[in-house]
Amino acid sequence: MPSPAEPAKPDTTAPGFAPIERTGWANDKSLFPGRVTQVFATKIAQFVLGAATLFLIARLLDTAPYGQYQLLLTWIGMLFAVGQLGMPAAMTYMAGRGRSVVSLERMALGLTVAISVVLAAAAIVALPLLRDTVLRALSGSQVATSDDLLRVVLIALPCQLIMQFAAGILYTRGYNSVFNRIQVAQAALMLVLTLLLVGVFPLGVPGAIAGYLAASCAGALAAVARIRRLARRAEGAKGPAASAREFMSYGIRLYPQNVMSFFNYRADVLILSWLRGDAVLLGYYGLAVRLAEMTFYVPDSISAMLYPAISSSERHDADAFAPAVSRFTMLATTLAAAAVVPAAFVAIWLILPDFKPAFPALLVIMPGIVALSLSKVLASYTSGVGRPTPTAIAAIVALTLNIAANLILIPRWGIVGASASSLISYTCHASILLVMASRMAKVSPLAFVLPRSAEFARLRRGLASGVTLMRAWAGRARPGR
């Protein structure tokens, strides 16, 4: 019998057996570097637009309001992590396994509505308790409508869900450029709206939230329209229909990892808000974390393509493919982190001098961000082969360590203590996944970490391809093109 973690193999000798046709690019590994380059170019555009939005909001809002804004975004992220039930990951997995786009579209829309309604109702009921604990930094806020904002920002829930579902469907079916353009347009719209609603019309935190929600809704509507067009094509009906049972079977196994991973990322912000209740400190720490996490554009570009590629691969191909991708990720992420630190130093001192206390926290957390980048790729590998349990175990251990370290270190060292707690837990998370992944692939842990000459060559080719692609985009964007 097959193990419970792996799906049973079909009987190929049975009368009428027909193998599932896995359409899209994911079966062809030769396309992987080019797809990663496209996504990376998209992430670079998002990086530029996101950095401009980040510094604009921080500059216009000042420290305390900026901390409140970051806490509101953490609030919506917490609700999404708790309520998504592993369904976005299940969507990518089922799309990679050849389920029809028509059935995936129905599943995406139905799940979005059901999850959003239940989550919003639960959030409103829980608000009084959360306002006095992890959302305490909003207490006594100069933003008179903070409670209203906590409710209004719930509009982002269905937007985040549909964007995650769309990524799983479109990336797996090879419509990368379409989804990439949606993401870049969304980031550009948010920058423009921030400039208007916070800069031109000084609406403060409500204006920043309004810009965020408007951009989120626009991106979600564009994603729904694109999935709808794909479902209407003849290829949209190919493959067996996705069932709610298989979605729940896969998603629930991955759900603990998703929830624990989020709180491992954001427990520091929530505990800092609870223990200190100081929006100014939260503003410093929020900026440090956001700057450090810009390094994630590298692993996010790779893991966005790796998960559907692994999901549609045979096991022996996945075991050989993942270590090479992981080595490349570590090389590129380390170089990106080395570039972000001096750039952040210059930006803070020249543009945001009021945020200078954020820089020590940035320095402490940055090695942990590199470790967490490794975790992202390893999680794509273990989950993509249908084994989500290792990622859940790593997330649970790391979160327990994170909470304990934050409770000890934040009262002593403030935001630097929060960074140190994240460094400890992120390193632990990556170490556990590294050991488990190396056992699954039957290779040394160093095979996932230490880059070889091939990775340096791929980096050079990738950078050259990315520059060429961005020049092509710029050429098409000129007037008259």
Image (cartoon, helix red, strand yellow):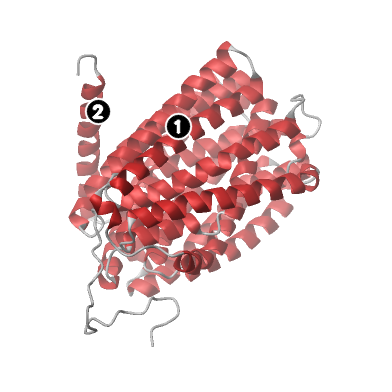
Please give the name of the residue rendered at 24% of the width and 14% of the height, measured from the top-left corner.
479
Which of the two residues, 114 or 396, is positioned nearer the viewer here? 114
Q: Is residue 9 above or below residue 477?
A: below
Determine the CA span between mark 1 and mark 2.
29 Å
Count numbered badges in the picture: 2
Tag 1 near tag 2, CB within 8 Å = no
Q: Is residue 32 above or below residue 139?
A: below
Q: On the picture, is 381 further left or further right than 356?
A: left
Q: Nearer the viewer, residue 103 or 66?
A: 103
Point out residue 315 in the picture as x, y percentages from the top left corner: 30, 71
Q: Is residue 91 visible?
A: yes
Q: Earlier in the sequence, mark 1 or mark 2?
A: 1
- 357 left or right of 227 in image: right
Element type at mark 2:
helix
User: Callout 1, which amino acid?
Assistant: Pro
Asked whether the viewer can see residue 330, the reply is no
Question: Residue 23 or 441: which is nearer the viewer?
Answer: 23
State which quadrant residue 155 falls in: top right
User: Element under label 1?
Assistant: helix
Specify the amino acid type for callout 2. Answer: Trp
Residue at point 40%, 51% (across, down): 105
Q: Quadrant of the N terminus?
A: bottom left
Find residue 351 and report its horizontal and vertical position in percent. Answer: 53, 19
Quarter occupied by residue 141: top right
Label placed on residue 58 = none
Classed neighbour count for the residue bearing mark 2: other residues with Cα under 10 Å, few (<14), some (14–19), many (≥20)? few
Give the residue pinned by disc 1: 342
| Outermost bottom residue | 1
Report whether 349 appears left or right of 169.
Answer: right
The residue at which mark 2 appears reads as 473
Quarter holding the C terminus is top left
List x then y, in percent, for residue 464: 20, 37
